[in-house]
């Protein structure tokens, strides 16, 4: 049973948080016991435990799996309408579309009403942390408003009759009472336009601005760049544009835009007409104390862009969660984005950890090794400084399920470990025997872009694919660059761009360098294709049109879709190749 408390009661919330984080090991054992008692009779667990709910037996017998292993069970429920008890004795009410990080194949994750309660409890704890840090850190937040952007898509039903949504949509649609002021509109253009317009009209009341992921916030800023003149004109005339026809949008905007506001329109024009949009968030919403968006893991690439647009406001990265389960809360919301750790909340699910040698390529962990089980440790036994791959066992039918996320233990809050979000184990680029992970690629790109930073550039977004259309194949990176001055991108210095290509190669691992160095080269020189501005927005729109939610969108780093490559290729403004073979000794 989860403790209950009023989310506005910060003291009660803090007491509960202290209590559960002081008893993490014990609570985890209880959680596993509850899950097994509840679900021992499911088809899935019966196959390994023969109806028993013994924890020791679970640890011995139940295999480590990934989505492909359990897809067959989920498909029986989702497509054939078979009962939930194949996987869980809670009743599955929805399936959550999980993006994972890299826009790979979509996964469908079961959700139940009870799980909704657990997540509500987690959200209350998160509010407790945010409320108490706000109280401590800032004055005047109580009389202000938060501008939190949310987007929803129409519900889809599976052939088996279950609703298919993203995790964020499920949270918003099931708990409308918690978010009475959200504009829920399924047309993302009308929705964003209206949300921004409301935010502009109330610009003096806004004290924080946010959305789910950092990439989403950048998309919103770009949308604002494309529409501010029209919004300002709406404010000047007191009339909303005629293309906003959605009743929810019209109702929400008409409540606050009821008269002509020429002074407000003038001040917005003055700010937006400035050539550089550096610090635009702080300028448009001058009372904003912080920005809220997940900025860790694969989102870390957006830190420089976000710092640019927010004018250096603190970015609060509040939680680590997923469609599968919610995991951790950031107890120090104001810390640097590079230092964020998440304290795992022990009542949400049963967590286990597969150690990863700190020097080992995470992709080397043999995915089907029967002995994997022998290396698993539980939450109470993780070690500071060690990387782990996260496994999760949930009430909703996932057992020892590989999340694909790597986490690093950084410390403890009471007896509960805190984790820095590492990266996904997923390989984004592969030719021959080379396997380049998202983490390796991100580090290499961060290193290379430093060459362009003194010229006033930052990298707005990037992606990649392995081009094997010629022999030898080679890796292609697509870069969208932006100038801090907001000027058009000038002709790029070929020597510097080639240096960027070489530096990316130099920063990749030994295996890559070896394959590049062989007398008959197995991998060809790495290529950077610079794309024109706005390209990654078009890419995002493409994925959204394919069913990805804008709230949870993460730019795919390993582009597989031919259409997506076509979108990028048709906007290339410069192609550059590495001119040096990477040095194997460094
Ligand atoms: P989804 O199921 O589509 O919500 O995606 C969940 C995935 O998003 C996780 O497995 C992580 O890879 C990523 N993610 C979620 N929260 C964070 C976070 N705080 N920092 C970095 N990545 C995150």
Image (tube, grey):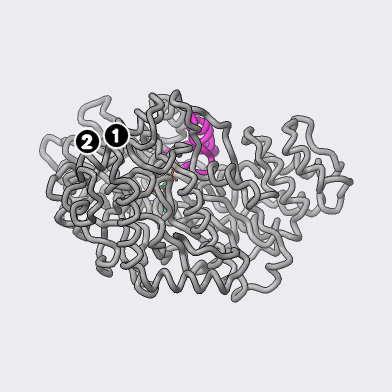
Q: In which quarter of the image is the N terminus?
A: bottom left
Residue identified by numbered label 2: 431
Earlier-in-chain disc, 1 versus 2: 2
| Distance of label 1 from label 2 (alpha carbons) | 7 Å
Q: Residue 404 carries which label?
A: none
10 Å crowding of disc 2: few (<14), some (14-19), many (20+): some
Residue segment shown in magenta: 530-553
Image coords of residue 525 (percent x, y): 26, 38
In the visual, does 242 lie left or right of 274?
right
- In magenta segment, residue 33: no
Residue at horizontal 65%, vertical 44%?
Answer: 225
Residue at horizontal 27%, vertical 47%?
Answer: 505
Q: In which quarter of the image is the C terminus?
A: bottom left
Residue at mark 2: C-beta within 8 A of ligand 1? no
Report if residue 439 is visible in the image. no
Residue identified by numbered label 1: 466
Seen in the picture, residue 269 relative to 311 is either above or below; the reply is above
Q: Which of 119 and 168 is in front in this view?
A: 119
Seen in the picture, residue 21 relative to 163 is either above or below; the reply is below
Pointers 1 and 2 in contact (C-beta within 8 Å): yes
Number of numbered discs on residues: 2
């Amino acid at each position: 049973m989860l403790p209950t408390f009023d989310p506005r009661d910060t003291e009660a919330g803090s007491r509960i948080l202290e209590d559960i984080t002081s008893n993490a090991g014990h609570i985890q054992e209880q959680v596993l016991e509850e899950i097994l008692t509840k679900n021992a009779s499911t088809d899935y667990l019966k196959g390994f435990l023969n109806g028993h709910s013994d924890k020791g037996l679970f640890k011995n017998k139940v295999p480590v799996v990934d989505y492909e292993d359990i897809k067959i069970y989920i498909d029986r429920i989702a497509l054939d309408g078979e009962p939930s008890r194949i996987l869980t004795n809670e009743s599955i009410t929805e399936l959550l579309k999980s993006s994972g990080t890299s826009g790979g194949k979509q996964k469908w994750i079961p959700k139940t009403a009870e799980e909704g309660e657990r997540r509500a409890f987690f959200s209350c704890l998160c509010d407790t942390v945010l409320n108490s840090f706000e109280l401590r850190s800032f004055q005047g937040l109580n009389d202000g408003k938060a501008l939190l952007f949310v987007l929803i898509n129409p519900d889809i039903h599976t052939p088996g009759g279950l609703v298919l949504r993203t995790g964020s949509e499920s949270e918003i649609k099931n708990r409308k009472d918690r978010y009475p002021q959200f504009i829920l509109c399924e047309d993302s253009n009308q929705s964003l336009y209206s949300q921004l317009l409301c935010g502009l009209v109330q610009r003096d009341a806004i004290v924080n601005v946010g959305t789910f992921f950092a990439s989403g916030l950048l998309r919103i800023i770009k949308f604002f760049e494309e529409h501010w003149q029209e919004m300002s004109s709406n404010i000047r005339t007191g009339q909303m544009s005629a293309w906003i026809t959605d009743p929810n949008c019209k109702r929400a905007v008409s409540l606050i835009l009821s008269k002509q506001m020429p002074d407000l329109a003038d001040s917005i024009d003055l700010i937006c007409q400035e050539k550089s949009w550096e610090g635009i968030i702080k300028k448009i919403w001058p009372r904003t104390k912080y920005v809220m968006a997940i900025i860790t893991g694969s989102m870390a690439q957006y830190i420089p862009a976000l710092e640019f647009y927010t004018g250096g406001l603190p970015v609060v990265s509040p939680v680590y969660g997923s469609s599968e389960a919610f995991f951790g809360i950031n107890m120090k919301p104001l810390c640097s984005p590079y230092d964020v750790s998440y304290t795992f909340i022990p009542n949400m699910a049963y967590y286990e950890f597969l150690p990863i040698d700190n020097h080992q390529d995470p992709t080397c962990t043999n995915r089907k090794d029967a002995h994997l089980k022998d290396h698993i440790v539980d939450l109470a036994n993780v070690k500071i400084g060690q990387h782990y791959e996260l496994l999760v066992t949930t009430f909703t039918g996932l057992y020892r399920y590989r999340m694909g996320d790597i986490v690093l233990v950084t410390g403890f809050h009471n007896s509960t470990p805190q984790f820095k979000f590492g990266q996904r184990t997923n390989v984004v680029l592969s030719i021959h025997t080379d396997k380049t992970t998202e983490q390796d690629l991100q580090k290499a790109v961060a290193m290379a872009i430093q060459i362009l930073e003194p010229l006033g550039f930052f990298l707005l977004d990037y992606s990649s694919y392995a081009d094997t259309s010629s022999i030898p194949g080679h890796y292609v990176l697509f870069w969208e660059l932006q100038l801090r001055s907001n000027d058009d991108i000038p002709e790029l210095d070929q020597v510097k761009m080639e240096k960027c290509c070489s530096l990316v190669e130099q920063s990749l691992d030994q295996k890559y360098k070896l394959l590049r160095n062989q007398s008959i080269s197995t991998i060809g020189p790495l290529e950077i294709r610079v794309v024109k501005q706005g390209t990654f927005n078009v890419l995002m729109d493409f994925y959204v049109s394919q069913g990805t939610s804008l709230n949870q969108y993460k730019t795919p780093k390993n582009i597989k879709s031919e259409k997506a490559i076509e979108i990028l290729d048709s906007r290339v403004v410069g192609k550059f190749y590495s001119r040096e073979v990477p040095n194997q000794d460094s």
